[in-house]
Image: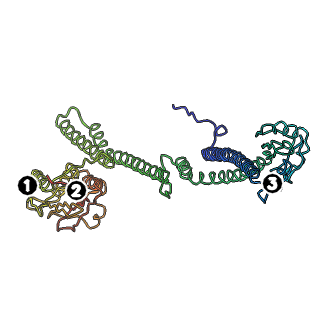
């Protein structure tokens, strides 16, 4: 007995949720990675922009120092030069420009955090940097500030132009942008989660249908099928599952039919054998011999029935046919020669086709000889039995015609059913024409009869086929 290893439902996570979780996780990682990359690049860009702005301010101050005032005259003092520098600049809200001389910050331009100019610690830092000039990023009560000090020496003593950029404010703007990005990414992630849940449910619908259908299938009901829509792997799975159910249904139907036929048809010979053996007088040698002959005959009939029923059961298996390139002309000649060995009749050939097709020559021979045997049972010595073959672009026609008693009108539609016999014939098992139909249908063809009582019958097998690439 096979033990199930499936966990209880309470301990499992549906595939739909797992797919949704995986999609959300991957999307979240992608959005997070993109956010980190954007933040890193933007932070570097902001640093580069501030560095470029400082370089530009310092360069402009140096040009002002060399150029002088509007008349081209050099500034008379350090204080005049620094005052002119302040007048020629318009700082933005994140920048503060200061003038430093006599050891203290003397003037400033309006900008961000003007109170920084009054901070003693900041003033000491500027005094320290004014000696040689420097660029530093320092921490203040207004946040991180990048300070550039450009010293100047002239009449009136040393001084310096001070450019302060409030990096905390600049980075706060970037942080605000990233918070906006995070909010938008969160909403996008929520939308992705909802979409993934709905799409996963739609994609997994065939799997759920397959599960439900498999649960409804029993040994007595194999008719359930799944509706296949779309053109993807799950649709292929659905079609494959339906094809499997078709094969199972066919196999079970064949098995049931085989059991029903065997049980029905073997019951009579078994009853006959049993009855004669029970009534046989062992002391009567003649009766023993007659009973023995009867029993052997019934056993032969039973063996033939089992063989024919087994053949019919195998006719639906994929390996029932072994197709090969077959020369129709050679096959026709072989068939008529084998038919002539059945019994004395006027054996004729109506038509003799030429060409090469892919069929199972042994099964075709078996079907044709079965038709010939059937014709023999319904004809006399003076009657004619003819074989004919015709080949066109897409089909092979093979027929057996006789001039015997023909088929009763009411049997034309049922003559190929199992255990159907015409004219009260006691010869044969009634399975011969059923075998013919099974062989032809295995070739995806059909067989029909054209007959009327008293004017013979013509049985025609029509087999779709493709011409072989090269003839023999």
Q: Distance between the residues labelled 1 and 2?
A: 20 Å
Is residue 341 in sight in this rendering? Answer: yes
Single out the mark in the foreground, 3 or 1.
3
Residue 119 vertical placement versus 383 (above, below): above
Name the one closer to the observer, 163 or 412: 163
Single out the mark in the foreground, 3 or 2.
3
Helix or strand or loop: what does disc 3 sit on? loop
222 to the left or right of 264: right
Q: Which of marks 1 and 2 is nearer the N terminus?
A: 1
Is residue 182 in sight in this rendering? Answer: no
Helix or strand or loop: what does disc 1 sit on? loop
Looking at the picture, how far across and down is residue 135, in whole percent? 76, 40
Q: Neighbour class for label 1 at 10 Å: few (<14), some, many (≥20)?
A: some
Q: Which mark is residue 425?
A: 2
Q: Neighbour class for label 3 at 10 Å: few (<14), some, many (≥20)?
A: some
Residue 278 vertical placement versus 463 (above, below): above
Q: Find disc 1 in the rendering and name its residue.
A: 344
342 to the left or right of 154: left
199 to the left or right of 378: right
Q: Which mark is residue 91?
A: 3
Q: Earlier in the sequence, mark 3 or mark 2?
A: 3
Q: How far apart are marks 3 and 2 (CA)?
A: 119 Å
Name the one closer to the observer, 126 or 185: 126
Q: Earlier in the sequence, mark 3 or mark 1?
A: 3
Helix or strand or loop: what does disc 2 sit on? loop
Looking at the picture, how far across and down is residue 469, in whole percent? 20, 55
Is the C-beta separation of discs 1 and 2 under 8 Å? no
Is the C-beta separation of discs 3 and 1 under 8 Å? no
Q: Which residue is drawn at 21% across and 32% down?
A: 283
Looking at the picture, how far across and down is residue 155, in whole percent? 84, 45
């Amino acid at each position: 007995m096979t033990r199930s290893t499936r966990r209880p439902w309470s301990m499992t996570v549906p595939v739909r949720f797992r797919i949704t979780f995986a999609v959300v996780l991957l999307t979240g990682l992608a959005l997070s990675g993109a956010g980190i990359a954007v933040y890193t690049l933007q932070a570097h860009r902001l640093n580069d922009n501030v560095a470029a702005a400082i370089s530009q301010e310092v360069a402009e101050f140096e040009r002002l120092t060399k150029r002088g005032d509007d008349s081209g005259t050099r500034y008379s003092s350090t204080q005049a030069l620094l005052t002119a520098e302040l007048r020629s600049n318009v700082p933005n809200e994140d920048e503060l420009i200061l003038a430093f001389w006599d050891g203290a910050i003397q003037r400033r331009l309006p900008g961000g955090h003007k109170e920084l100019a009054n901070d003693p610690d900041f003033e000491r830092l500027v005094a320290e940097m004014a000696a040689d000039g420097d660029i530093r990023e320092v921490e203040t009560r207004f946040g991180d500030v990048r300070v550039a000090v450009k010293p100047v020496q002239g009449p009136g003593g040393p001084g310096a132009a001070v450019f302060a950029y409030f990096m905390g404010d600049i980075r706060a703007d970037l942080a605000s942008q990233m918070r906006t990005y995070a909010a938008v990414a969160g909403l996008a992630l929520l939308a992705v989660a909802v979409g993934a849940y709905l799409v996963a449910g739609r994609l997994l619908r065939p799997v759920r249908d397959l599960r439900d259908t498999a649960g409804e299938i029993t040994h007595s009901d194999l008719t359930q099928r799944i509706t296949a829509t779309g053109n993807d792997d799950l649709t292929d799975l659905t079609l494959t599952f339906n094809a499997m159910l078709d094969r199972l249904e066919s196999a079970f139907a064949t098995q049931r039919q085989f059991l029903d036929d065997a049980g029905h048809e073997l019951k009579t010979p078994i009853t006959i054998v049993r009855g004669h053996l029970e009534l046989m007088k062992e002391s009567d040698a003649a009766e023993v011999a007659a009973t023995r002959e009867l029993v052997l005959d019934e056993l032969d009939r039973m063996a033939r029935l089992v063989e024919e029923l087994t053949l019919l059961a195998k006719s639906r298996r994929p390996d029932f046919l072994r197709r090969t390139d077959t020369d129709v002309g050679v096959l026709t000649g072989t068939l008529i020669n084998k038919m002539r060995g059945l019994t004395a009749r006027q054996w004729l050939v109506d038509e003799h086709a030429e060409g090469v097709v892919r069929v199972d020559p042994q099964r075709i021979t078996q079907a044709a000889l079965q038709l010939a045997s059937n014709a023999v049972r319904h004809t006399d010595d003076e009657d004619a039995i003819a074989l004919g073959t015709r080949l066109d672009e897409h089909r092979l026609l093979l027929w057996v015609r006789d001039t015997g008693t023909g088929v009763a009108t009411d049997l034309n539609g049922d003559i190929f059913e199992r255990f159907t016999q015409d004219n009260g014939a006691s010869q044969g098992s009634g399975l011969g024409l059923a075998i013919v139909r099974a062989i032809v249908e295995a070739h995806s063809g059909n067989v029909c009869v054209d007959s009327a009582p008293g004017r013979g019958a013509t049985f025609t097998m029509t087999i779709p086929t493709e011409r072989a690439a090269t003839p023999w």
